[in-house]
Amino acid sequence: MRLAPQPSALVIVVALLLCTEAITSPLLSSGCPDRCVCDEQLVVQCAGQHLSSFPADLPLATRQLIISNNLIAELPPLALNYLSDLVYLDCSNNSLTEISQSTFGNLRKLAYLDLSFNSLARIEDRTFVPLDSLVMLRMTDNPFLSEIHQDAFAENLALQVLDVSRNNLTVLNISTLISLPALRSVGLSGNPWSCECGSEELCLWVHLEGFKFQDEGQTVCGSPDNLEGRRLGEVGLELRTLCHHTLGSWDYLFFVIIGFVIFAAGTVLAWVMGVIMVLYERYIKKEDEQLELDDEEEVATESGRPTRARSDHENDLRDVLLHGTLIREVEPAPST
């Protein structure tokens, strides 16, 4: 008779270690929130419990948190960011109205995030930047969601699946999306897209990267009326033609006229500047000549004063000598 194989010593040791880890796990030692179910796989299940607020006292080692189908209106950053080991977060079918960068500030390991069936209206700048490991993001069925900031996914280099179907989006700046190296699936259907010049890049992206859009056939224009119902991938090339008009004869004539006006204005301005410079030089030259004349007169005046004084002194001396001579001639000679 063949005996059943006995477990090896290694298997027994591994089993004992797993049991020991489960017993000492922070998850099990810290309890479980009310109306939630926690298991040994570090999963906390709180779905469909009519919760109006985020569950309190969550085990710090939680790796999967499911709070879908409740009435939660806010994700408190302080409570959520304690769950640094969180990998999976399902917040679908709640009453969330806004999220921000601080909401997920410490969830570096989070790979799956579901925000579908909520009341989000706008995705702010760099909302998901802290999520370095985010692989899949679902934000479908938010009827008020009409704006997603172009830098909301700026650094989610690991993002592979993005679904924003069935929202109220009319435009989407794809500058950061097209630079994500791992992105392989995008859902855009069910939105009232505006197929005008502002959405040219989006339409061309859908046309060129059609394999990334599993619902490309349902991704259609909502406006204008003449393009309503047309697939975004079809109108991409049309928008390229419509939004970049070729130049006609009147356009070239306009450029010629503008060039002539600019040339004439430049010529007149150069002539005016030349006249001003000539007049300025003449004025400066005249001022210099006047200063030179004034200096010469001043020098001549200063040098002429001592000469005149010396002449007056000589004239006086001559008068004195002449007067003395006359006196001697008039006086009678002494008698002998």
Image: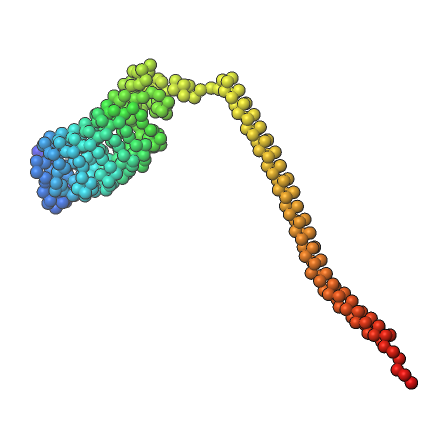
State whether residue 253 appears in this view: yes
Q: Is residue 214 above or below residue 15?
A: above
In this view, which residue lies farthest toward the bottom? 336
Q: Please indicate whether residue 182 sits to the left or right of residue 1 in the image.
A: right
Taking depth in this image into account, of 26 and 315 the one nearest to the observer is: 315
Q: Is residue 189 above or below residue 129?
A: above
Taking depth in this image into account, of 250 and 108 the one nearest to the observer is: 250
Q: Is residue 239 above or below residue 96?
A: above
- Give the residue drawn at x 67%, y 55%: 295
Q: Please indicate whether residue 334 sits to the left or right of residue 315 in the image.
A: right
Say which quadrant the N terminus sits in: top left
Q: Quadrant of residue 107?
A: top left
Q: Quadrant of residue 158?
A: top left
- Give the residue drawn at x 63%, y 45%: 284
Say which quadrant the C terminus sits in: bottom right
Q: Position of residue 129 (x, y in %)?
A: 28, 38
- Give the residue drawn at x 71%, y 58%: 300
In this view, which residue lies farthest toward the right? 336
Q: Quadrant of residue 274?
A: top right
State whether residue 189 appears in this view: no
Q: How many marks?
A: 0
Q: Position of residue 38 (x, y in %)?
A: 11, 37
Q: Position of residue 165 (x, y in %)?
A: 25, 24
Protein image colouring: rainbow
Q: Please indicate whether residue 77 sits to the left or right of residue 235 in the image.
A: left
- Give the residue drawn at x 28%, y 30%: 148
Q: Position of residue 113 (x, y in %)?
A: 22, 33
Taking depth in this image into account, of 289 and 298 the one nearest to the observer is: 298
In this view, which residue lies farthest toward the top? 226
